[in-house]
Amino acid sequence: MNIEPNETKIVVLGGLGEVGKNMYCVMHNDAIVIIDAGVSFPEDDLKGVDYVIPDFTFLKENEDKIKALLITHGHEDHIGSIPFLLSQVNIPVIYAPNHAKQLIQKKLEDRNIRYDNLKVYDDKTKIKFKEIEVEFFIVTHSIPDSHGISIKTPDGRIITTGDYKFDLTPIGPDADLYKMASLGHDGVDLLISDSTNALNEGFSKSESIVDETLGDMFTRFKNNRIIIATFASNIYRIKHIFETCYKHNRKICIFGRSMENNISISIEGGYIDHKEILINAEELKNLKPNEVTILCTGTQGEPLAALSRMSAGTHKQVKLTPNDVVIFSSSAIPGNALSISKTINKLYLQGVKVYTSSSLADLHTSGHANEEEIKLLMKLIKPKYLMPFHGEYRMLKKQANIGIACGVKKENTFIIKNGESLILKDHVITRGPIYSGQDIYVDGSRIGEIGSAVIKDRKIMASDGILVVIVNVNMKEKKLLIKPNITTRGFILVNENEELIKKIETKTEQIINEALKDKKINFILLKEIITENLYPYINYLTGRKPIILPIILDIKK
């Protein structure tokens, strides 16, 4: 590996140009610490893919140098790829805050992965790995035990915020402004900072305002059954819902596996009180509408989520009535607006009252910093260099501009891509070498086996279908024995397009007979010739390009 002695390298493996799969490394001499190991969830065009994870090639090649994995907090885009990482790379120790540790343990148990060196840190913890010194500070986010991390090497100090916002009336603990300012006073060379909400002006709303609005909704609809859909990982929102239901003498019934897991871990960890108000689906039948609140997943219109099934009338335990009130205590993740709208329309068709976050009802606030909060961070940390992180390119660019407005020199801002690196040497940062930073697809138990070619084929099959050509030949005599048989899936209905099928069969017969005139013809060449000649012909007839799959059977007499 090309690294000079006594210099610090920052290698980004995920989280740039995207919101998700956060992962980067700090390396000094022969010591590497990894910060976060997240996943992202596939868009609609990634057919059959379960997760998208970072490329671990850099870590595999430098496995002997890895000292630890440090986790900022317990959201999936920061811990989701840990099981996949542990299956490929030896990680000596994982340091995580308490809530994240519980979530990681549950995740590993579900996958039957044994890992015995998962340690808890807090804001007073200090760790040293050779010449790398690490300490932590509390930040405000939508999940308990969220932290920023300070990493100091002989070349300078690097600070990452993790996910954060500034909320002066939070539901959880206050952010440690003093420690941030103290680190800034001591000198910060590089700030790696959350960019998710950089495009949003002003300050984000306080979580306490959302709590107040939700409390008003419970008072207003005291005679109705209330159904709340929120992010399963927004523990402080769920904590308030529990407290409000307790105050209004309502029981809570949970639907959604991720919701159940997060709440169970949060109750065990003491982050959520009043577990006595929880009931199961069977008990739900025996309660009046105004005695219960249903807490469920489905804020993004996911087809299999609890709320989506309720809206479609297919949920086994919950049948909606016009007396129900459905509250979306969430925001739309980019790309999900259409599916959310479909769910809301179905809810209206069921006759229920639906409330979403708007200027009239503060039912959700983000856990990420808006523009003015980013400015406050810049004034506290006072970084010499800035690397925007955790965001699409436009978000990274906006945060870089905010940094410049707050005193960071333009040439000291770095908008880089996954796989790229920076080098910190004697408090000066320059661009470093580029490593592999591609997306790795997880499909079932297969990691990285599904490449772009397979995804392309799946897209074609989804849009244009597949056409199978079954050919019986005698390769020794170079003779077609019977007319080719054509069958399709997702292309056309054979019974309703007999004339088209006959044309394709006739054309295929002509292609094969012509190809068999070549005495050097073999199976592979014959398949290629059939495919290459049928593509333009079928496209000419139908305007579509199905995947063509020739199956050649050598029949010996």
Image (cartoon, grey):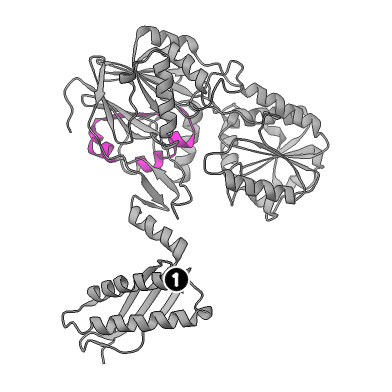
Residue, x 63% and y 46% (percent of image)?
341
Q: Quadrant of the N terminus?
A: top left
For this view, does 461 lie left or right of residue 8?
Answer: right
- Vertical placement of residue 104 versus 381, above or below: below
- Vertical placement of residue 298 versus 163, above or below: below
Residue 457 location (% of width, % of height): 38, 60
Q: Quadrant of the C terminus?
A: bottom left
Residue 258 location (% of width, % of height): 56, 42
Residue 56 location (% of width, % of height): 31, 40
For this view, does 521 lie left or right of residue 81?
Answer: left
Residue 119 in sight in this render: no
Q: Residue furthest bottom?
A: 557
- Vertical placement of residue 127 versus 552, above or below: above
Displayed quadrant of residue 186: top left
Secondary structure type for disc 1: helix
Toward the viewer: 114 or 399? Answer: 399
Toward the viewer: 281 or 338? Answer: 338
Toward the viewer: 3 or 388? Answer: 388
For this view, does 59 lie left or right of residue 546?
Answer: left
Residue, x 39% and y 7% (percent of image)?
185
Residue, x 68% and y 48% (percent of image)?
345
**Number of dots carrying numbers:** 1
Q: Which residue is mark 1?
A: 542
The amino acid pointed to by label 1 is Thr
Residue, x 44% and y 33% (percent of image)?
78
Residue 308 in sight in this render: yes
Tell me the crowding category of disc 1: few under 14, some 14 to 19, or many 20 or more residues within 10 angstroms, Cα based.
few
Q: Residue furthest front?
A: 540
State yes or no: residue 67 in magenta. Answer: yes
Looking at the rendering, the stretch of residues picked out in magenta corresponds to 57-86
